[in-house]
Image (tube, grey):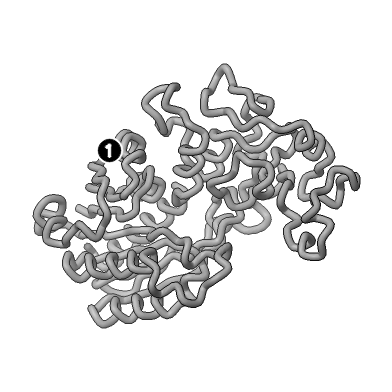
Amino acid sequence: MVSAIDLFCGIGGLSYGLKKSGIKVRLGIDLDETCEFAYEKNVEAKFLPLDIGEVTGKYLLENYWKKKNEVRVLVGCAPCQPFSSHSNKVKGKEGSTKWNLLKEFERLIFEASPQIVSMENVPNLSNQVIFREFVRFLKDNEYEVSYENVYCPDYGIPQKRRRLVLLASKFGKINLIDKTHTTDNYVTTRDTIGHLTPVGAGQVSTKDPLHQTCNLTEINLKRMKSSKPNGTWLDWDEDLRLECHKRQSGGTYKSVYGRMSWTEPSPTITTQFYNFGTGRFGHPEQDRALTIREAALLQTFPEKYKFCKSKKDIMLTRLGTHIGNAVPVDLGFVIGKSIIKHLKKYNK
């Protein structure tokens, strides 16, 4: 039996991918208790709304890893804000409580001694001292370690997300499975959301309550109508441009208020995907930003995934946070398949 515990699990993107690959997920831990319903409903594992600083390896072993013949897999994606390319101040972050979460992950590895460890995070983390210390810790504790910055379309994920993926094993060398796609057959935005029925800004589909997004102001509607797929605000008339666009520094943010293209993977889905002004989140044809359903599909959540108990629980901002912060399900699947392949090689 191969069983996993997921730290910083959110609504279960990584866990669901592991489950899809054939790994039994026993527990998810996350401080955000609003993730509990989606996690338990879909992953079918226990959710603990706790700070991992309150969890011990002994507790995990005594309550969730009780079988001696189990291969224990500990995975997690520590909140990445300190390491993100969107952060303007990388230096001096060592004192941040967010940095300490990686140290808590390290502590639980030491206390529970899982045979397999995996971490997913932002690419910039690999350049930080704290990451090099984490890798050294794993090697000092007899893990073979590999890591790489993954371009998600190379594994059939329809968004241009780049993520750092680390794998470590006590059994021997471990690596991600080979890439499954090339530029010739990347999964596109059209492949992923092109089948959905049209919906207007501020409207809700009668067929799917998650197929909804924000309304647009009159001026933003004009900007949207003037936007072209993969274009910029330079396509707009002068009177539609913002003051920041007219400054020299404004030229650096050309994807803001952008429209996506049907023929490519989407941009990286963030927690603000429903807001036309926060990135290239304009629909390729319709005059609106992405809907909750579209973002979920681009994050490779299946349409059967249950995010809320009922329609009255659907909150755009909350689901934006849940979906935007999630590990894409199919990246979790790739990680799971890599672990399974590795264990078969070593007859575990």
Dot 1 surroundings within 10 Å: few (below 14), some, or many (20 or more)? Answer: some
Residue 88 is situated, as x and y percent measured from the top left of the image, at: 58, 68
Q: Within the image, what quadrant is residue 304 found in?
A: top left
| Furthest-top residue in this view | 206
Left or right position of 337 against 297: left
x and y percentages locating residue 189 in the rendered image: 65, 43
- Residue drawn at the location 73% of the way across and 32% of the way down: 217
The reply to whether residue 177 is in sight is: no
Percent x, y of residue 306: 40, 31
Count the numbered circles shown. Answer: 1
Q: Residue at x 25, y 41 (%)?
A: 45
Compared to residue 45, the image places residue 165 above or below, namely below
Q: Residue furthest front?
A: 243
Residue under label 1: 44
How far across and down, in percent of the image, does residue 28 sit? 28, 48
Label 1 residue SS: loop
User: Which quadrant is home to the C terminus?
Assistant: bottom left
Q: Nearer the viewer, residue 6 or 156?
A: 6
- For the question of whether residue 42 can be seen, the reply is yes
- In front of the other: 192 or 36: 36
Residue found 80% across the figure and 52% down from its top: 243
Is residue 270 toward the left or the right of residue 216 in the image?
left
User: Which residue appears at 76% of the width and 56% of the height?
Assistant: 254
Amino acid on which disc 1 is placed: Glu
